[in-house]
Amino acid sequence: MKILVVDDFSTMRRIIKNLLRDLGFTNTDEADDGNTALPMLRTGKYDFLVTDWNMPGMTGIDLLKEVRADANLKNLPVLMVTAEAKRDQIVAAAQAGVNGYVVKPFTAAVLKEKIEKIFERIQ
Amino acid sequence: MGNLDKKKAALDPEVTARLREQSDELKAAVDSGDYAGAMKLITELNEMRDQSLYREVGRLTRSLHESMRNFQIAPQNAEQAEALSKMTDASDRLSYVVEMTSKAANRTLDLVEEAMPKANAIREQATSLRDDWLRLRRREMKPAEFRALYERIDGFFVSISDEAEEMYGSLSEILLAQDFQDLTGQVIQKVTTLVKEVEDNLLSLVVMASNVDKITGTTHEFDESEREPEDPTKGVGPQVNTEGRVDVVSNQDDVDDLLSSLGF
């Protein structure tokens, strides 16, 4: 299981990577925005994408739309972990095809629950 | 009625007195047919209006300058004094906060990442020793195995006391890494005070401008369509005052409820 973690703050990427490692996912890579993440996703054979929303360059929602529009990536599970808390935004993410939405600040238990739920649904 | 009160309150009593005096003189000049004198008085009135406006703008500018200049924080040691003396404006100060918090977060993460594998190793060793210990208690162990277990227990006591000491060291360093809160707290409070002062001064400027508009009878036309709409796809960051707002979720349960209402 290879996971890409996209967030513009390196501390948040480290926190998510540590939590993922505790859940048994040790194969993780990092990117700091959508523009960096997209080429990695296209070449790197990732199984799961965790992304923030608010980032310079390409935002998480635009990255999600790019992923869904790409024939090779369109089925990639995407979990959004973000401080964006407007109802309109959550609806927009759902419409764009997000698989899960975790609002910051979050707990390890919430992250675990959402990831497990996504995998349950896929299998 | 309320508008009239505001108009009265907005003018300097000295200006009001002069205005009254000159309007009487103006009336007298017009009544007596002294039109040149009347025109001169009108020009004077105009100048007085401009001057009181300039004076008010000047006063606000001075208090803004004052707020900016007073915007200093008291350093506690030479290192801080040097760090702080380099900062001359609020945005520098806020970058300093970002830098300090990021340094502290990274330091804490380093120490946590060092300590976690140690805790893991201790747990694994303890589990394996406990399993063998139970076998010993059930008398399922051969003497050679017992001798090996004896050695391992010996080694475990040494390593556990070393690793516990190292973990304790990490924890106290994590404790110390939180000292940024003191400095960043001071800086943010100063910036907040400055913002508040600027806000108050801007508000007085707006009130004054609207009074000037009322007195001079100026109207402005605003084109609402020129205002840039907020683009939610860009991301707006964390919501700070969520109480009583219906357009914003306040926790993960709200997110889950919203998503499940959408068929998730």
Image (spheres, grey):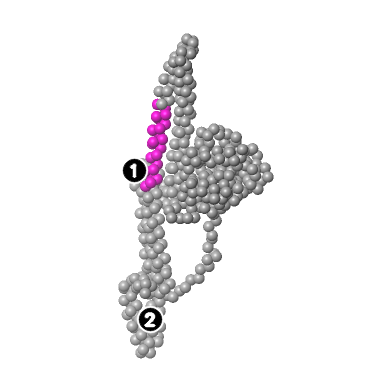
Residue A60's x, y, as percent? 57, 47
Residue B187's x, y, as percent? 39, 48
Residue drawn at 47 percent across, 16 percent down:
B135
Instruction: Give the alpha-carbon distance from disc 2 to disc 1, as whole Å.
Output: 60 Å
Q: Residues within 10 Å of mark 1 (few under 14, many from 20)?
A: few
Residue A76's x, y, as percent? 62, 42
Q: Amino acid at mark 2?
A: Leu
User: Please, what secondary structure does the residue beneath circle 1 have?
Assistant: loop
The mark found on residue B76 in the picture is: 1
Q: Which residue is more in the foreground, B231 or A80?
A: A80
When asked about the image quadrant of residue B80, the answer is top left
Residue drawn at 67 percent across, 42 percent down:
A72
State yes or no: discs 2 and 1 in contact (Cβ < 8 Å). Answer: no
Counting residues from the start of the chain, the first of labels 2 and 1 encountered is: 2
Q: Does the image show residue A13?
A: no
> On what subunit does the disc labeled 1 rest?
B
The mark found on residue B41 in the picture is: 2
